[in-house]
Amino acid sequence: MIINVVTVFAVTMFFSCQSNKRNSQQYVISEEAPIAEAFEVNLKYTDSGRLTAILKTSRVLDYSNKSFPYHEFPDGIVLDIIDEEGKTSIVTADYAISYQQTGIIDMKGNVDIRTSDSTHLQAKQLYWDQSLSWVFTDQPYKSHLPDGTINEADGFDANQDFTILNSRINDGVMFIEE
């Protein structure tokens, strides 16, 4: 009788161990896969208790497990940037990737910026260096300024409020007071 109980116990342990091993193999993650995935994200950034930005996206992939960590936004982003006066500028893009070590966000596809002072900028690609508060691109872009000035060029760099703008190879309409 004791031998039967020991045999049943040993057989049960053998099969339960194999079952656990088989189940654990189902959870092996590819080295190329993200460590996490989030849906319908509404992320709020603050600085010293003040709301500075709101990031909205339908999907974000977290690759912080990589040697050069990043977050990918394959379905695009809507980013509201709120200045110290509470004025909001809105940035949208079809795709974005944010590199954690450098603080640079690379936005691609129908990048559209509408600042609080009615400046409107459209580009194919735009980089935003968060640590320097600087935006730049080497791709063609078009801007509409509040005074009616229209500018098309093959690249620019500017501070994030567009009070400093260095444009390259320009073509456009500019209004000058006499």
Image (cartoon, rainbow, N blue to C red):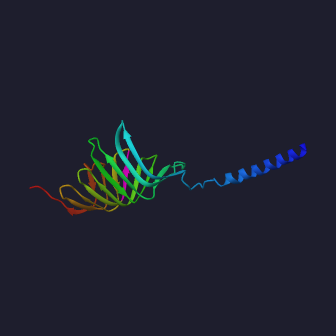
Residue 108: x and y in percent read 39, 59
The verdict on residue 129 being magenta is yes
- Where is 36 relative to 144, above or below? above
Q: Main secondary structure of the magenta part?
A: strand
Going by the image, does 40 lie left or right of 122?
right
Q: Looking at this rendering, what residue extends furthest in the left direction? A: 178
Q: Quadrant of residue 5?
A: top right
Going by the image, does 30 lie left or right of 171?
right
Give me the residue at 89% from left, 42% from top: 2
Give me the residue at 55% from left, 48% from top: 65
Looking at the image, which is closer to me, 156 or 12? 12
Looking at the image, which is closer to me, 68 or 122? 122
Q: Quadrant of residue 113?
A: bottom left
Residue 22: x and y in percent read 71, 54
Looking at the image, which is closer to me, 135 or 110? 110
Going by the image, does 56 lie left or right of 176?
right
Q: Quadrant of residue 3?
A: top right
Q: Looking at this rendering, what residue extends furthest in the top direction? A: 48
Look at the image and tell me in which quarter the C terminus lies.
bottom left
Residue 52: x and y in percent read 34, 43
| Magenta segment boundaries in residue numbering | 125-130
The verdict on residue 152 being magenta is no
Look at the image and tell me in which quarter the N terminus lies.
top right
